[in-house]
Image (cartoon, rainbow, N blue to C red):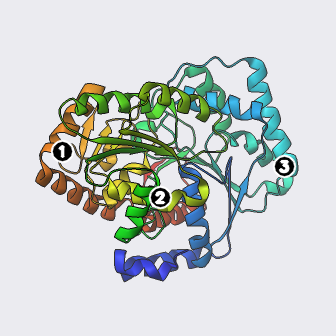
Amino acid sequence: MAKISEYIPIVGENIIEELHLLGSKLSNITIQNINSTSVGGGVAEILNRMVPLMNELGVKTRWNVIRGTDRFFHITKKFHNALHGRPETITKDEFDYFLEVNRENIKYLKFKGDVIFIHDSQPVALIERKSSPEDKDKKWIWRCHVDISQPQQDVWKFLEKIINNYDCSVFSAPVFSHPLPIRQFMISPSIDPLSDKNKDLPEETINSVLNKYGIEKNKPIISQISRYDFLKDPIGVVEAFKLVRKYIDCQLILAGNIASDDPEHDKVLTAVKEKAGNDPDIHILVIEPAYNDIEINALQRASTVVLQKSIREGFALTVSEALWKKKPVIASAVGGIPLQITHKYSGMLTRTVEGTAYCIKQVLNSPEYAKQLGLNGYWHIKQNFLLTRHLREYFLMFLSLYNTNANDIVHL
């Protein structure tokens, strides 16, 4: 992985010097991250990059993953859907079992951090550990990576009672904020420009990936790179593509990996394949973890247009990834996506299948306009959504935990 000094040509020496300064002020504090999976999904990806860099900057940082049964992850997938506003039926037994699994994790996890940094709903009830005498001086943060602007109320009320016991919460966009008696920080996620998924690739690498999957290089490529999740609306992507292809000869790539805490993957993948039928211009790919980052990078760089047609979305780092590669992006105006795209300036925002198809046709028929959208998007991501900004805001948040004012909402 890249060393922090390797980011200087991208972001400038002053920013790296500031990170070293902030890191030195946190040298006596250990940060312990806890989430539900080390493979697949944006949270694991961010932690894989941030944890080594935080340690290099002098901030002792750990990362632990909770254990869970298939039943537990089916329940937390329901939580995930319900928090995004998709109706789910969750019984009292399922709420009780969720708490039971968290309590089992409390027994085996070693809470070694001065700051316990909990990511998303799966491990949220670990906060019960806060009441133990040996942990009375620890600071607890709950980091929400999903869109909770319109959550299903029974699930939100259940979680809210738990979240209120934390010292502070973190959301990716102001629209996700809820009235809480604890401090709230607004910190957007980020991409790592030097990771395998985002670094420059030689043309031969891109061509070899296209050849591997039987994708034509000389026909416009529309792509969506996302987990196979109904909330990412891959079926709507297929419908929009079919509308476009009535007028323009093109091909579609749907590609994603498997998150170990997402039991709906196979169900969604099956539904997408049925919708696509035997269309030779629709490429439905499941990228194996061993090849994931380089191949996704290559597919994005080969794309003419990149989509993110989510129904609900916490942030969608795939948007930042594509814009960083100077690609025109067409995405739904939901969740954290409008923070990354200014409509018709750094990308295009849509809300329907028909609107998505219209924007795709416009971009494919106007290559100079498409190029300008991608270039504007690149500069916006460089200024706002790179890993170094993310590290700075986390460091400032950690420092603020030791100088707090209740009920603050902080925009870092």
Please rate how many residues cluster around mark 2, counting C-alpha atoms within 10 Å: few if below 14, some from 14 to 19, many from 20.
Answer: many
Say if 72 sits above or below 40 in the image: above
68 lies left or right of 208: right
Mark 3 and mark 1 lie on one chain; the one further toward the N terminus is 3
> Where does the image place residue 407, in percent across and percent down from the top left?
52, 43
In the image, which is nearer the foreground, mark 3 or mark 1? 1
Q: Choose between 83 and 132: the one closer to the eye.
A: 83
Say if 292 sits above or below 106 in the image: below
In the image, which is nearer the foreground, mark 2 or mark 3? 2
The amino acid type found where label 2 is placed reads Glu
Look at the numbered discs 1 and 2 and tell me whether their residues touch, using CB distance below 8 Å.
Answer: no
The amino acid type found where label 3 is placed reads Ser
Label drawn at residue 132: 3
**Residue with the mark numbered 2:** 295
> Where does the image place residue 73, in percent across and percent down from the top left?
70, 35
Q: Is residue 100 visible?
A: yes
Under circle 1, the secondary element is: helix
Residue beneath the point at 21% across and 29% down: 246
Look at the numbered discs 3 and 1 and tell me whether their residues touch, using CB distance below 8 Å.
Answer: no
Under circle 2, the secondary element is: helix
**Residue with the mark numbered 1:** 364
Mark 1 and mark 2 lie on one chain; the one further toward the N terminus is 2
In the image, farthest residue toward the right: 107
Look at the numbered discs 2 and 3 and tell me whether their residues touch, using CB distance below 8 Å.
Answer: no
Q: Quadrant of residue 302?
A: bottom left
> Where does the image place residue 316, in percent across and percent down from the top left?
43, 46
> Where does the image place residue 266, in percent across and percent down from the top left?
61, 33
The amino acid type found where label 1 is placed reads Leu
Mark 2 and mark 3 lie on one chain; the one further toward the N terminus is 3
Q: Is residue 403 visible?
A: no
Mark 1–mark 2 distance (CA, rounded to whole Å): 23 Å
